[in-house]
Amino acid sequence: MIIYNFMRRVLLFIGIILISFFACKKGDLGPNLEADAGSDTTAQVGDTMRLDASGSLGHNYEIIWTITSQPSNDTVTYSQSDSAFFIPSKNGTYTLKLRISKDNEFSEDYKTVVVAGAIPLQGTLLNDITLTKINTSQETDYTVRSDLTVSALMEIDQGVIIEFAGDAGLIISETGMLFAENVSFIAADDKWKGIHLKGPRTVLVSCIIRDAGSSSFTTETTDNASVILTGNAVASFSGNTFESSGGFGLVVRDNAVFKLDNILQVHPLANNKFVTNASGPMKVPAGILSVLSSPNFTDESEGTYLTIYQSTYASTETASANISDFGIPYKFTGPVKFNKPLIILPGVEVYFTRTAGMIITGDLNINGSSSKPVKIDGFTSTTGSWNGIYVKSGNTLITYTSILNAGYRALEGLAEPAILTVEGTLNIQNSQVSGSSGIGIFLKDQATIQYAENFSGNTLQNNMTSAIRLAFDDVHKIMTNNTISAYSSSVPAIEVRDGKTDFLGTWKNLSAEIDYLIIEDVTLRATKSMTIESGSNLKFTAGSAFNISGSLDATGVTFGGSQQTAGYWDGIIISTDDHVTFDNCNIQDGGGGTTDKANIMIQPAAVNVIITNSTITNSAGYGVIIKAGASSFNIYAPASGNTFEGTLGPYLDEN
């Protein structure tokens, strides 16, 4: 009996222990506790998920909440209290366990929270923020429904996707900074506004900015773009894609610049891709050319341009300006100044709007080739449809280039419109200069062509003022292996100003009504010789004179005023100890000087003058004046075959 009672007590004790043990599981309950974690639910990243154990059965028990599985590393706050909560940081499924216990009893229950959807961002962010990837799939991580302004540092982790509503954009303020790599900025629907950068440091690497440009951040309605920089913004862009903008891919305004980011070693503006942007890839100032490297325009919209607006390439830039062939033409919409040398590389096409042109302080080098020529034209490709090119204080080298349809207005610092104005030396070969509403090529002041081989294979035609204006002693250098023609019968092929004491060579008959228009006094200087080909027609502007101090041979040449009025020009003044010959020439419309009025005046210094079979008429003074001490050279003798006529008389010999 004693043994029986003992065994009975042992078995009862074991039974109590087993009952207590199995009471810890829901569904196998003890008499006093039953955990209830609440219903499964859904949430969004950033929501405060409060955990409620009030549905549990029992009294005076202790609780503890834990997360047993999750897509992140989140924890429960106040996990052992009635105030427990957690804030999910990523999308996915969270499993939470509630354990309640009292003395030797406990019970557990589980709750599932499915976190999905994007986090909304709005207003102005005044504190530094990091946007992490909250979705493991390709779903949107963050949504922006109205303009989001960042006035602190925003860092965006790789893979993040941000979605914008139609009127929404991202604004990085003057105090804001943005660092993003491999981030997608996309539209919620059709289009969104874009990214407006004003801050001192923005770094975008391998990002996608798609379907932006719904409207402009500025008062200029055509500034709509995927990204616009204004004010004193500084940015570094590398490997990004600007796609399907309603305007441009990129717009740069004011003093905004791209610079190397020294901390992250990101190139200022390299290897960016532009795809099907409605207005084209870029609207930028000329200074951007100093940092633009390897853009990809292969899939850019047909018929668009890389647009350069009125701006200056500063002298403080460390390198010359390069206009490179990136497979898309350039469009200049205003006067652009280059205060450094400019190089235009093979294959480039540049088009200018009506008031646009280029002024270069420094050398200009246009390096077209036979296989990749350069084309420079007005946007409408009609006569005088842009202003032209002015090379100040520099030399010009041009090969295999067509420069067309400029001369709409004179550029700043010039009185004459022209396609190309040069102040230094000019070397132009295998090129075309045509369609000017002014001069084709203007060699201004001391500008010169050094050698004849520096001007060859060129076509100058259809220029409304003249094909070229150049120095007296440069004319012979353009006579060989070039096509030079006048626009019409009333327009000269070549305009001539005075030059240096250089070799003169032969002036050819260009078969124009006016081959040469002499626009100011010119001098054939001592020891220099000149030949004018038969059939050539030289016209002189009002008050100009032809001073001969060297050797001249003119046969079958016409010398007259640009208007056929007696005294329109001053005439020919011969004062040389060298040989001068006029045979079968027409010399007319002179005698316009204040004294010694004549078509021809022979000074005492003249030594060897032959004038034969020539017509010397329509003088406002005499046909010929021989000054006291000069020889008559028998030019008035009947055997000379000359004809003289003048308002004051045919001939005056002061001896």
Image: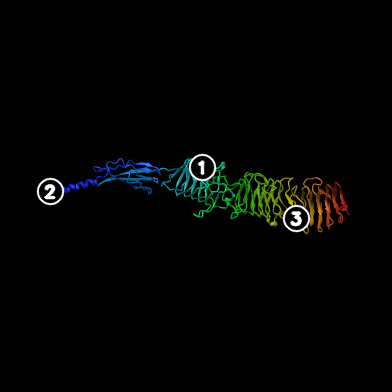
Q: Secondary structure at mark 1?
A: loop
Gap in angstroms between the C-alphas marked 1 and 2: 90 Å
Q: Residue most toward the front?
A: 60
Secondary structure beneath dot 2 equals helix
Q: Earlier in the sequence, mark 1 or mark 3?
A: 1
Q: Which mark is residue 57?
A: none
Counting other residues with Cα less than 10 Å from the Cα at mark 1, is it few (<14), some (14-19), or many (20 or more)?
many
Residue annotated with mark 2: 4
- Left or right for 324, reference 492: left
Mark 1: amino acid: Lys
Most extreme residue toward the right, as rendered? 655
Position of the C terminus, as image quadrant, is bottom right
How many marks the image carries: the answer is 3
Image coordinates for residue 45, horizontal then vertical, percent: 40, 44
Q: CA distance from mark 1 to mark 3?
A: 66 Å
The residue where tag 3 is placed is: 506
Residue 182: give x, y in percent of width and height: 47, 49
What's the amino acid at mark 2?
Tyr
Residue receiving disc 1? 193
